[in-house]
Image (cartoon, rainbow, N blue to C red):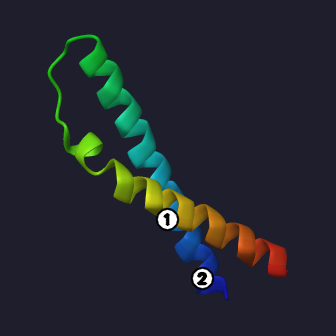
Amino acid sequence: MRFLKLFFNALVIIGLILLVARLITVGLQFAGIEFTTFFIDYSVPSLAILLIGALGSWIIDKRK
């Protein structure tokens, strides 16, 4: 059970990092500054990582 909690928390952290990177990328593109499109190209998988991590953490915490 402890492993699952650590795993889901890691997914949340990774998802949040990708979310911040996506927001920075969009902001820079809106300002007209060239930046990598890596984070926008993979926005759906990064959102899925964040949702799976958040839901998994919520379920693990609810079971306690």
Residue 30 got which mark? none
Q: Residue at x 72, y 67 (%)?
A: 58
Left of 2 or right of it: where is 14? left
Q: Residue furthest front?
A: 44
Camera-side residue: 55 or 13? Answer: 55
Circle 2 — which element? Answer: helix
**As displayed, is residue 12 above or below residue 4?**
above
Image x and y of residue 46, in percent: 39, 55
Mark closer to the chain start, 1 or 2: 2
Q: Residue furthest top?
A: 31
Q: Residue furthest bottom?
A: 1
The three-letter code of the residue at mark 1 reads: Leu
Left of 57 or right of it: where is 27? left
The three-letter code of the residue at mark 2 reads: Leu
Q: Quadrant of the N terminus?
A: bottom right
**As displayed, is residue 44 above or below residue 29?**
below
Circle 1 — which element? Answer: helix
Give residue 27's quadrant in the image: top left
Left of 25 or right of it: where is 36? left
Give residue 20's quadrant in the image: top left
Residue 11 got which mark? 1
> Gap between marks 1 and 2, in whole Å?
10 Å
Image x and y of residue 14, in percent: 44, 57
Q: Residues within 10 Å of mark 2 (few under 14, many from 20)?
A: few
Q: Residue at x 45, y 62 (%)?
A: 49
Q: Which residue is mark 2?
A: 4
